[in-house]
Image: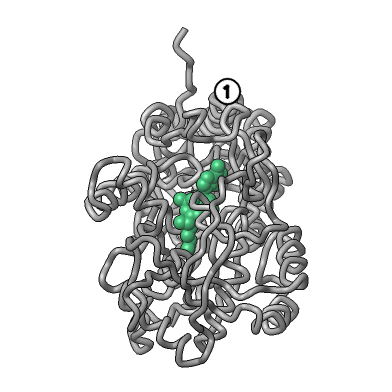
């Protein structure tokens, strides 16, 4: 049996339409999921929508639609965005599904039975936008002196009966978890933040609400609905069959990786493992926090109305170029700025010029001057060995960067080889060899085809469509594109299909 790998995106709130930020996490997770599948893992990749809570209820009301009809519509839009971004998720979970209600109620009962939940009264600040409770001393003053959450979200004073989760009782267990598994929270700066937060002392967490009803009823006390974050986090268990621990999908638990934006690390790295420990379940192996995108230098926000829908960008630039841009432009973990100019520049320089030209120059030359077949190679020169050596060591370098979720470093390693291959063509000048030394010309072309093949293999997770095309053009059968197939080589004299451009240059309309 191959090793399992379970990874997730956050499940997205359906109070608004999908935007570039959602697409970003989804693409990052997708690239990793595809990488792991090609690398021989048994992968389960989950995404979905977070459909309960006060914020979604309010959005449905504002739209004049029943919450269920509203969430049906927006969830379908998120699923469409995922499809258009070529996200290869194995499941799409919606928290309004019956299977999820069952999982949440089962966890609740487990927590009750463990004595980890008790009934009390909540009096404190709540920010609907963040669906989060805040302590008085965390609040900041807004422009008009009004109290705001540290995220800038408006807060309201809430007094209502509430069930509490005994978070305070899990402080030591959490600290022990972070200590024993230093990689549990990444990057390191985030880990330090979480550590400081937990060390400063944890208060019990309100885990039910009575002032609205759009949620999962608390078993035995249906006046209460579960706090939307408890409900939401449990999705990761629902999708693998919980509470049926005998379900064949439950083999994926614990999750290997929860990919999240930096603003929701606390929920994933503090509350979630505490719930799981209390319920007697294994905790996930890693929570990785990535940065935030701004758009043309501005934060995306309702008031600015500058949320970018990725789909028109896919129509204009192609899904592969957009996926590439998102992971190439900024180190994963850091913040980034999206601009058309930066996207067009990456597309034209790195995709069209570097990679597109390498493929085009080599393949059209073979079509015209080497009978359109895989050229046989003769004795290898030092320059050939140097390039083949770089290509040969590439998979390991990329794998190592992917382990750290350093997508841009993985791409940089690949681009080093692409740039070296372009330098090699210029230097070896097969067009001159054509007149003087056909065997040497064929050797050079063969070295180039092998190099392009390796590049194509390793770029598949990032740009699945374009690489499918490229690998076909260098004669790699569709069934032989796993990384283990890199060991085999091309067959001398095998016919190659007529070449066609992989990445055309983008020319901005005047
Ligand atoms: O927080 N840049 O859902 P959400 C980068 N339902 N990523 C961004 C982004 C930006 N500007 N904006 C959003 C929720 N994201 C909860 C999660 S999980 C059990 C429940 C991405 O719709 C990023 O992944 O507010 C962020 O964490 C997520 O969308 C928040 O989505």
Structural crowding at the residue carrying mark 1, measured as other residues with C-alpha within 10 Å and reported as few (<14), some (14–19) or many (≥20): few
Residue 226's x, y, as percent? Answer: 41, 70
Figure check: 272 above or below 118: above
Q: Is residue 301 left or right of residue 139?
A: left
Tell which residue pokes out farthest to the top in this image.
510
Q: How many marks?
A: 1
Q: Quadrant of the N terminus?
A: bottom left
Front-most of residues 477 and 111? 111
Name which quarter of the figure residue 426 lies in. Answer: top right
Task: Identify the secondary structure beneath mark 1.
Answer: helix
Q: Is residue 19 visible?
A: yes
Front-most of residues 39 and 462? 462
Name which quarter of the figure residue 319 lies in. Answer: top left
Figure check: 33 above or below 338: below
Q: Residue at x 44, y 45 (%)?
A: 467
Front-most of residues 55 and 306? 55
Q: Residue at x 56, y 84 (%)?
A: 277
- Residue where numbered disc 1 is placed: 341
Q: Is residue 353 left or right of residue 475?
A: right
Residue 223's x, y, as percent? Answer: 34, 72
Residue 311's x, y, as percent? Answer: 38, 35
Figure check: 396 above or below 241: above
Q: Residue at x 37, y 81 (%)?
A: 242
Name which quarter of the figure residue 448 lies in. Answer: top right
Residue 103's x, y, as percent? Answer: 35, 78
Front-most of residues 78 and 348? 78
Q: Is residue 134 left or right of residue 115?
A: right
The colour scheme used to paint the residues is one colour
């Amino acid at each position: 049996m191959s090793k399992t790998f379970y990874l997730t995106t956050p499940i997205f709130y359906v109070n608004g339409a999908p935007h570039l930020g959602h697409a970003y996490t989804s693409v990052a997770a997708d690239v990793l999921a595809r990488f792991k599948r090609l690398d021989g893992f048994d992968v389960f990749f989950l995404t979905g929508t977070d459909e309960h809570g006060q914020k979604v209820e309010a959005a449905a009301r504002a739209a004049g639609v029943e919450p269920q009809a509203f969430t049906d519509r927006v969830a379908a839009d998120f699923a469409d965005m995922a499809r258009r971004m070529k996200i290869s998720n194995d499941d799409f979970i919606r928290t309004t599904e019956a299977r999820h209600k069952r999982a949440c109620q089962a966890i609740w009962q487990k927590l009750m039975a463990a004595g980890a939940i008790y009934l009390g009264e909540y009096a404190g600040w709540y920010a609907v936008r963040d669906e989060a409770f805040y302590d008085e001393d965390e609040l900041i003053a807004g422009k008009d002196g009004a109290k705001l959450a540290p995220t800038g979200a408006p807060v309201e004073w809430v007094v209502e009966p509430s069930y509490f989760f005994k978070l305070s009782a899990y402080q030591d267990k959490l600290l022990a978890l972070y200590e024993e598994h230093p990689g549990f929270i990444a990057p390191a700066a985030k880990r330090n933040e979480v550590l400081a937060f937990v060390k400063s002392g944890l208060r019990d967490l309100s885990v039910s609400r009575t002032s609205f009803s759009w949620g999962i009823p608390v078993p035995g006390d249906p006046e209460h609905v579960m706090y939307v974050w408890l409900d939401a986090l449990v999705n990761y268990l629902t999708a693998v069959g919980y509470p049926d621990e005998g379900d064949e999908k439950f083999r994926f638990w614990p999750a290997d990786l929860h990919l999240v934006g930096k603003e929701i690390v606390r929920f994933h790295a503090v509350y979630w493992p505490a719930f799981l420990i209390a319920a007697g379940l294994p905790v996930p192996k890693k929570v990785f926090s990535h940065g935030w995108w701004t758009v043309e230098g501005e934060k995306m926000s309702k008031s600015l109305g500058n949320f970018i829908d990725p789909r028109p960008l896919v129509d204009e630039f192609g899904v592969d170029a957009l996926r590439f841009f998102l992971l190439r432009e900024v180190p994963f973990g850091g913040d980034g700025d999206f601009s058309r100019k930066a996207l067009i520049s990456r597309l034209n320089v790195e995709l069209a010029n570097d990679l597109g030209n390498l493929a085009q120059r080599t393949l059209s030359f073979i079509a015209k001057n080497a009978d359109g077949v895989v050229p046989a190679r003769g004795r290898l020169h030092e320059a050939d060995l140097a390039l083949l050596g770089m290509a040969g060591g590439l998979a390991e370098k990329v794998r190592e960067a992917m382990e750290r979720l350093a997508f841009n470093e993985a791409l940089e390693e690949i681009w080093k080889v692409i740039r070296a291959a372009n330098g090699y063509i210029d230097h070896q000048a097969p067009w001159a060899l054509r007149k003087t030394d056909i065997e040497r010309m064929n050797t050079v072309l063969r070295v180039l085809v092998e190099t392009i093949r390796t590049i194509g293999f390793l770029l598949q997770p990032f740009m699945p469509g374009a690489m499918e095309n490229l690998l076909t053009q260098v004669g790699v059968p569709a069934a032989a594109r796993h990384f283990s197939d890199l060991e085999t080589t091309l067959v001398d004299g095998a016919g190659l299909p007529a070449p066609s451009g992989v990445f055309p240059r983008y020319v901005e309309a005047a």
